[in-house]
Every structure is written in C-alpha cells, then in structure tokens.
Image (tube, helix red, strand yellow):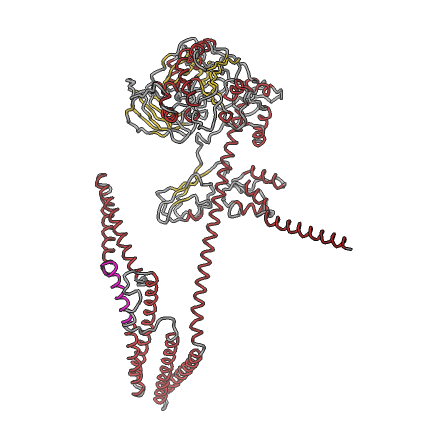
Amino acid sequence: MTTVLIAIAALLGLAALFGALLGYASEKFKVEGDPIVEQIDALLPQTQCGQCGHPGCRPYAEAIAEGEEHNLCPPGGETTVEALSELLGREVLPLDNEGAEDASVERVAYIREDECIGCTKCIQACPVDAIVGAAKQMHTVIADECTGCDLCVEPCPVDCIDMIERPVTLATWTWDRPAGIGRRPEQRIEVVNL
Amino acid sequence: MKGVHPAEHKAVSNQTPIAPGPRPSQLVLPLNMHLGAPARPIVAVGDRVLKGQMLAEPAGAVSAALHAPTSGTVVALGPRPIQHPSGMDALCIVLEPDGEDQWAPRQPVADHTRLGPGKLVAMLRDAGVAGLGGAGFPTSVKVNLGDHQRVEQLIINAVECEPYITADDRLMRERAGEIVTGIQILQYLLNPHDTLIGIEDNKPEAIAALRAACADSDIEIRVVPTKYPSGGEKQLIQLLTGKEVPSGSIPAQCGVVCQNVGTAWAVKRAVRDGEPLLSRITTVTGDAVARPGNYEVWLGTPVADLLRHAGVDRGRLGRLVMGGPMMGFTLHDPSVPLVKTSNCVIAASTEELPEPPPEQACIRCGACAEVCPANLLPQQLYWYAKTDDFERAQHHNLMDCIECGACAYVCPSHIPLVQYYRYAKGEIRTQTAEQIKADRARERFEARQARLEQEQAEKEARRRARLEANRKKQEAPADSNPGAGDEKLAALKKEVGQASSAYKAAVKAAKTAEAQETDNAAELRARADSLKAEADRAKAALRDAKAGAPAAPAPTPPPIPDASSAPADPAAGAPAVDTEGAAKRQKRLKALKTAYNIAHKQYKEAHAALERAERGGQESDEAITAMHTKVEKLKGKANHSRDALDALMEQAKADILARTGKDLKTLKLDAARAESALRDKADELARRRDTSDADTLETLNSELDALQEHAQLTRLALKTAVEEQGLVEE
C-alpha cells in the first residue's frame, strides 16, 4: 500500500514540477505579437503611402495576415506581390494599382520654399517625419528620409510641393542588363569630337 | 590558379623610355580620383595655385587629398565628365596652367625612421597617395593597421597581367631604385615578416633591374608564370603565399598587405622628395597612335590631349578604351581626365578591337568555370543574373567575382558575362540600399505613431482631469445648500408666473373694456396696474433669491473684502514672488470681479424697479422707501467690491514696481515703444533694400536685430511682471 502511495506522490510531484516549469517557460519565452505580420511587414516597401487603404505599411501587413488581398501595394510593385505570394502560399495576383504612376521611378517631395507659407499641414501629413519647419516658417523636406508617398502634396494649401524624380548619381548608377541573345552588348558610345 | 592567356600586345608600348606627357591648356581634376569619400575643395575659382599645393583636403577616414599638378589658376569648380563607365559628370576642379611650373615649398624627409609612423601616415594622406594599380584605395588607410594586426607578408604587386599595359614594366626598368626606397618606407610602416615582389616572367628587363636594386635588402623577388589574371590581389596572394582570402574579408585579416609597384614609387616621391602625387605613368597604345609608349602625365590631363601628344590617327581610331582590354571600359567622351588610377589608354583600330559578336545562347560547355580565378560557377551566376534571381546569385558568391573577364574571354557563345555580373551586383547593391532605407522608414513611422498615441493619451488625461474638476466644483455648492434655496426659488417662480399671468389677464380685460368704452374701464386699468406692481415685486423677489442663492454659498471669497483683508495677502509684501502666490492672487482677482459684476447687476435691476415704481406712483410710500433702502444697499455692495478689486490691482501694480523698479504703465509703454521702433526700422530696411549698398543694409540689419532683441526683452519683462502678480486676466 505504501509503495502505491509513494508512486502516486512521486508522479504528482513530477507533474507539479513540470507543470510549473512549462508555465514558467510560457511566460518567460512568450512570443510577442504575430510573427507572420512581422514577416509581411518586412516585405512591404515601408513607403507608408496609404495607397492600399491602410494608414501605413504595418496596418496593411496586419490586414493581409487577416486575409486581405496582397496585391494592393503599388510602390512595392510586382516583386512585392510575388514575394508575398511566396511567403503566404497564396496565388500570385496582378498588381492592383488603379492607374497609379509608374512605381519603378523613385520620387522625392520637393517644397518650393519661396511659395511655402509655413502652415505645417504637410508636416502633419508626413508619415515618416521627413519634413522640418515651424508655423509661419518655411518648411523643407529631408530628401534622404522621404519615401515619396505623395501624402504631403494634397494638404498643401498653396500647392508648393512637387514630386520630383530622384536623379541617378555616380553612387546609385548601375550597369544595364545586357540586351540578350542575338544582340551585341550595349553601353558603348561612338567616340566623338576628338 | 586558373586563368587565360590572351595575346599580350605589350611590345607595342614597352620599347621606348618613359616620355614626358603633354602640357594641356586645362587640367580637370575630379574630386573622387580615389576610392572612398570625394575630397573637399579648399580653393576658390580665381585662386592662383602653385605646383604641389593642396586643392582639396581628404574628407573622412577613407579619402585622399588632391593637389595642383602644376602652377596655374583655378578657373572652374563644377561638374565635368569623369573616368566612369556611366559617362556621368562629377565635381571637378579645373586648373589652367600658367606654363611656369612653379613649385610650392616642399618638405623632403631624408630619414623616414626619424619621423615616426603616425606622422608618416599623415604625410601620405596629405600627399594624396592612393593605390595606382586600379582601385585607387587610399594608401594611408591601407598602411595604418594598428598595433593589434600583425603583417606577415607585404606583397608588392608588379605582375601587370593585363594585355597592352606596360606602365609598371617601364617604371621598374627605369626607376627600380626609387621603387625599392618606397618599399622600404612601407616596410617601416607595416613591419612585415617577409616582403615579396610578385612579377610575371614576361618582363625579364624589369626583373633584372629590380634584382639589382634589391641586392642588399631583405626584399624577395618572386617570378610567377604569365597568366591572366594573376595580378588580381587575392589571386596573387594565393599564388605567392598559398593563403586564400576568405569571401567577404580583406587581405589584412590574413596578415597580408598588397601594394602596387607604382604606389611604392609614389610613396617614395611623397616622403623623400616631399612631392605629393601629381603625375603618373600611363601607357598609350593601340594601332591608332603613331607613338605608342609610356608617358608621365599630369593628373587631370584630358585623354584627348594625351592622344594628340602620342600622335593619334583619327581615321583609324575605332574604339577608345580606358584601362586594359579585359577590365577597362569604353570611353564615352575623350575630354575625360586621366586620374590616379588611369594606367592605360588604348586607341584601337576597328580590326584590333572589333565589335563583339552578338550574344548567343549558353551551350553549357563549362569553359568559363575552368578559367574562373575566383573558383566561382560563372554559368550558374549567368543564369541567375539573367533571370533576376539575385538571392541565388548571392548564395553562389557573386560578390566574390573580380570582374576579370576571363569567363567572357573564353565563352564560345560570346556572352557578355561580366556585364551580366555587373548588372546583378548593381541590382543587389540597390536592393540592399532600399532595404536599409525601408527599415529606417519603418522605424521613423513607428516612432511617429508612438508619439502621436502618447500625445493623444495625454490630451485625453487632461480632458478627464478637467471634467473631474468641474464635476467636483458643481457638487460642492449643491452639498452646502441642500435644497432649501431651490424650494424657495421654485415657490417664488410660481408666484411670479401667477402674478404676471394675472397682470396680463387684467391688461387684456382693461383693453377690452376701453375698446368697448365700458364704465369699469378705469377701474380695470387701475387693477391691472396694481397687478403689475405685484408681478414686479414678485420678479424682484425672485431675482434677489436667485442672485442671493449662488452668491451666498459660492466658492468665491466673501464679495466684500474689506481693505484690511487685501493687503494681508501673503504674497503682497514679499519681494520674492512665488508662483503659488501669483496663482492665489489671480484667483482672488477673478472672484472679486465676479462678485462686483453680480452686485452691480443687482443694483441696476433694483434701481430700474425703483424708477418704475416711482413712475407708476401706485406703490405705497412704505414700499418705495423699502426699495430705496434696497437700492442703496446694493449700490454700497457693488462699490465695496469694486474698491476691493481696485485695491488688489493697485497692490499688484505696486508689487510690480517693487520688483522691476518700474510701474506697470511704464512697462507697457516700454514694450509699445520698442515694438514701434522695431516696426519703423523694418519699414526703413524694406524701403532701402533696393537703393542702398550692402554695407548700409548690413548696418540696418544689425540694428534691426538689436531692436528685435530689445522688443523681445521688454515684452518678456511685461509678461513676467504681469504673470508674477497674477494679472493675466487683465
């Protein structure tokens, strides 16, 4: 009889021990947030432009995780749709950009500073705090931080914000892809005015 | 090591000694001749500079200085086409030589060991010495490794494996002594275990010259078989030491430092002769030039000048290549300048370097993999680059490709493999940059979200606190006067309602009677009048009750503070003003004002009622006397509160006087005067902006600034004074 009791006591003790251990581990190593949202968010271009109908890339990532279409991101383009399809195991959908401008050209907001009246409306609209300025002071865009999302253009009461193309510099220039089979390599220009 | 054996064509240019280069009418000096950050210009357009004078200083850790190759005048500082395959412009300093070639003072160092490594490195940095082999990496960075890094081998790269180029070959034949001195300086800086010179066996004269120069030194000459590209840094290291530099690391991490033989020469010139890097040996070769050979050219010499100097035949010129035929690039524009890394210019005829044949399909022959010196799989890389599968290309170590062109050289399908790799590398770099930017945008977006949320929460908390405070305030009087007043008020209201409706009915009846001219019309009219008086009395009673009810239990201090209570204010006499006192006084002022307003209103109403009663003449004398007393009482009350208010104000003003030495009026006047002076000055400035000269405007501007400051100060003084005394409401 005592043997049985000892056995039961031992098992109960072990059960309590492991239960406590598991309980502790589940608290200690708790996974914060939804990892799939993080992964989707990592694939989105972080333009924060809201063209998908969500106030930023992360909210859209959350929406995708909950089943929304993954082809609503014009700045990401086809490549983002493909990457998302691969991640989520969904069908590759055609990009839904509703005649938006060509996303392959990188743009940056430019404030015509003479015309700026210092209303701070664009500063409030910028999702990444890339516009500096104060009330009744001229504003300007931190070009390196601008994501080219267009959100500052609409609120400007004097229409002094242009979206201009980011020029190619020596630092960003890259070689073109060769023309392909049957063609001669390009990027050679005849020698002139020697 | 794997590689290829392209036709050498070296004999075209290595038969004649190094000749002086052209003396062009303009030198174009790009600020980024070297690898790393572009130099920062320190001269302005119009400056006259001497030979060897620094034109641009190094900007950042990895950067090199830029000097005037000859004396002359800086004529421009702007974008010019430079030595870049993109054909794009970059910022250049344009120098017009004056033909005098006048040196700036030089400081040669005869014994570099007495200078110490730190000063020597700084000297190389200021002399603008950069790798002359091809990449142009600043030498001062490469030789400044720090104490923890032990250099086992210093390798001097004299291989010069690319066809056509003979600049290093001629340099070694003619200036072996200078090169060895340069190597000794590098040895002193790096303190290597062994020093090796790697040289190909197709340069016997150069080998002999170096052997003679190194006779009594510890420098070892290692002759390697001729094979392209054994002059690649990692390839040469493997060839001479057997060490393979791991992917993604630099030779220094394996204890090896590699320097070009030309760089060693430049180091000697910089230290021993005090001459910064002003010129280099450049090979001019190809069928289209009459006098191929090596020329010592000033940096910044336009390619066109050099070609004319070498006797170019424009009719025969088919293709102009900067660098060697394997790794060089076709020049877009012959006005581009020669820079620190320009070792060769090939002016080839069409037969010599024909148009490459069209690309054909890959037949998977594997010839490229057999020659790749980096042991990559060129074919796989080609497929990945072609299908934009950059991730796989990276897994196959695309980034280790040295772009030597051996694979493209052997490809039977004439696939421009290197261009595919360059394209893929560029795309990968762009993607990486975009990823970094996206991460930063995400961080900023999230930081902004967090900030907005916090602001919202704070606003909400403030709103709640306000609501709470209001609720408490409303509860307090209700508690202290539990319903009694309300009941009385309700009764009074009822009375008023009854009285006024009775009066209205009486008036109506009287009017009807008058219209019908009945006898009792006068009687009715009198009745109506008496009813009216009654209604008025009821109304006055209600008003009293209403005014009295909130006045009695109101949280405001007693509405009739006597003169003794006001000066007794704790903050009054104290010279040090505490904000608590100011807040208290502000509250008191507000309370007094409310009390005065109420009292004044009551007085007015009572007075109006009295006048009406007197006009009507219906009231008994007794009632009128009572009303008189009441009016007097109310008047006294109103006056009293006004006096208390005035006393408090006076006291506040006195305090301001005590604290600032000026009374409130003066302060206000000061502020107003400063403002108007400021406005006047601004107007004057605006008026004279177009007519006056710069100096006057400058003075006006500074005056304006001073006035602005003054106005600000007075404004501030007024504000503080007012705030300190709690007069904000005023």
Q: Out of B282 and B660, give the one closest to the viewer.
A: B660
User: Which quadrant does the C terminus of chain B fall into?
Assistant: bottom left
Boundaries of the magenta span: B642-666
- In the rendered image, residue B46, in percent from the top left (x then y), is placed at 28, 27
State the residue at coordinates (46%, 58%): B460
- In the rendered image, residue B205, in percent from the top left (x then y), is placed at 45, 9
Residue B540 in which image quadrant:
bottom left
- Residue B277 visible in rendering: no
- Residue A141 visible in rendering: yes
Q: Out of B229 and B276, give the one closest to the viewer.
A: B276
User: Which quadrant does the N terminus of chain B fall into?
Assistant: top right
Q: Out of A8 and A41, give the one closest to the viewer.
A: A8
Where B30 falls versus B22 (above or below)? Answer: below
Q: Residue furthest front?
A: A2
State the residue at coordinates (25%, 53%): B675
- In the rendered image, residue B335, in percent from the top left (x then y), is placed at 39, 21
How many marks the image carries: the answer is: 0
Magenta segment, prevailing SS (helix, strand or loop): helix
Q: Is residue A55 magenta?
A: no
Where B474 falls versus B172 (above or below)? Answer: below
Q: Is residue B658 magenta?
A: yes
Q: Out of B382 and B126, give the one closest to the viewer.
A: B126
Q: Residue furthest bottom?
A: B519
Is B375 left, or right, of A6 in this rendering? left
Residue A115 in which image quadrant:
top left
Is B632 left, or right, of A135 in this rendering? left
- In the rendered image, residue B122, in percent from the top left (x then y), is placed at 37, 26
